[in-house]
Amino acid sequence: MNESKERLRQIIVQALRLSRTPESIPDHNLTAELGLDSINSLELLIFVENEFKIQIDDADLSVALVDLLDGLAAYIEKKKSGAQTGNETGEAEAMKSVGSGSL
């Protein structure tokens, strides 16, 4: 998951065109720390989908998904493992670890 987190930090800087280093991206409270609104969050998730070759279902979109780097990395890992095994229940399991709250 550490590799995913490092890639996520790079994606966040690139997607949001931030003038800071990937290492300065915090692990939690991303929405407040980076000043993310719903539009920024969706843009970020589109970059995540493209980079990791996953699809984030509409039902999975939540503030919690973009607020915690660990939660987003875990979601990505579960989506990737679910896609590799053809297990569609991986999506529901991934969201259990992330929480709820709409964007």
Image (tube, rainbow, N blue to C red):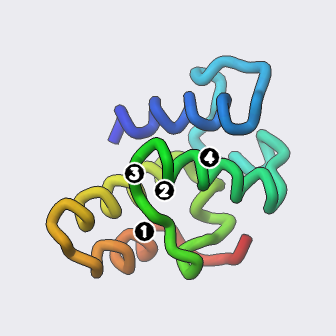
- For marks 2 and 4, the one nearer the N-term is 4
Question: Residue at coordinates 49% horizontally, 48% vertically from top-left?
Answer: 50
Residue 82 pos. (x, y %): 25, 67
Quadrant of the rendering where the C terminus is positioned: bottom right
Residue 86 pos. (x, y %): 19, 72
Residue 14 pos. (x, y %): 66, 30
SS at circle 1: helix
Q: Quadrant of residue 19?
A: top right
Q: Badge 1 is on which residue?
A: 97
The 10 Å Cα crowd at callout 4, few under 14, some 14 to 19, many 20 or more, is some
**Type of amino acid at the residue the image marks with label 4:** His
**Type of amino acid at the residue the image marks with label 3:** Lys
Find out whether the residues at labels 2 and 4 contact each other: C-beta distance under 8 Å. no
- In three-dimensional space, the C-alpha distance between marks 3 and 2, rounded to whole angstroms, equals 18 Å
- For marks 4 and 1, the one nearer the N-term is 4
**Type of amino acid at the residue the image marks with label 1:** Ser
Could you say which is closer to the camera, residue 97 or residue 20? 20
Question: Residue at coordinates 46% horizontally, 32% vertically from top-left?
Answer: 7
Could you say which is closer to the camera, residue 40 or residue 63? 40
SS at circle 4: loop
Q: Badge 4 is on which residue?
A: 28
Q: Which mark is residue 71?
A: 2
Which one is in front in this view, the residue at disc 1 or the one at disc 3?
3
Which one is in front in this view, the residue at disc 4 or the one at disc 3?
3
